[in-house]
Image: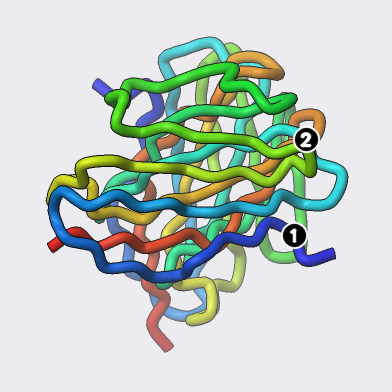
Amino acid sequence: DAGVTQSPTHLIKTRGQQVTLRCSPKSGHDTVSWYQQALGQGPQFIFQYYEEEERQRGNFPDRFSGHQFPNYSSELNVNALLLGDSALYLCASRKNSEAFFGQGTRLTVV
Amino acid sequence: KNEVEQSPQNLTAQEGEFITINCSYSVGISALHWLQQHPGGGIVSLFMLSSGKKKHGRLIATINIQEKHSSLHITASHPRDSAVYICAGRNSGNTPLVFGKGTRLSVIA
């Protein structure tokens, strides 16, 4: 079992561009959550997907959107990138109460 | 004020020392997680607690629900324990985790 896998691992984008990050959950996990972790901070909840629908959302603007596919994998899309969007983006999948995290995608906006 | 507070923010220890990291939370939680994050970003779940105490190798986690406090202890610390340790709480089964800012631990040989 590969656990939670995220791609790409690193990404550099220019202000104003759009980015798509991908996450494959741990086998058997149907709930995927995305978090943003700024340098020196704890992760902040972006949103959670279950049964292909956004179920909960944190305090992030509409520029952040997502999708979950029938195989439970998920994408995070960020439009009109700002310098402040530079962060580590973590995906977590969950079964019951236990959460498993991916290695993250480090996004740098220049 | 963050709902989950950790202390200390940074900790440097000599190899072999007993280490304690504390976590206090201001919201009701059903489960508290202790996580380890190495440079490069990946997070590993160490413990999930809803009551009492858990032990895995040299790591021990305790939680006091009434006092809304949890501790992570590392016995006989080793340089490979150097990482950021994060506590995170969940209010109920489907709510998202709320994270502390982490404690950066450096263990020196």
User: Looking at the image, which residue sits at the far bottom?
Assistant: B109
- Is A106 in front, or is B82? A106
Determine whether the residue tagged by mark 2 lies in a helix, strand or loop.
loop
User: Distance between the Cα atoms at labels 2 and 1?
Assistant: 13 Å
Where does residue B33 sit, x and y in percent of width and height?
61, 38
Question: Of marks 2 and 1, which one's residue comes earlier in the chain?
Answer: 1
Residue type pointed to by label 2: Asp
Which chain is disc 2 placed on?
A: A
Q: In this view, does B15 lie to the left or right of B61?
A: left
Q: In this view, does A83 lie to the left or right of B60?
A: left
Residue A30 - label: 2
Name the residue: 12% across, 63% down: A110
Residue topped by disc 1 = A3
Residue type pointed to by label 1: Gly
Name the residue: 71% across, 18% down: B93
Determine whether the residue tagged by mark 1 lies in a helix, strand or loop.
loop
Q: In which quarter of the image is residue B3?
A: top left
- Is B69 in front, or is A100? A100
Q: Is residue B20 left or right of residue A12?
A: right
Mark 2 touches mark 1? (CB < 8 Å): no
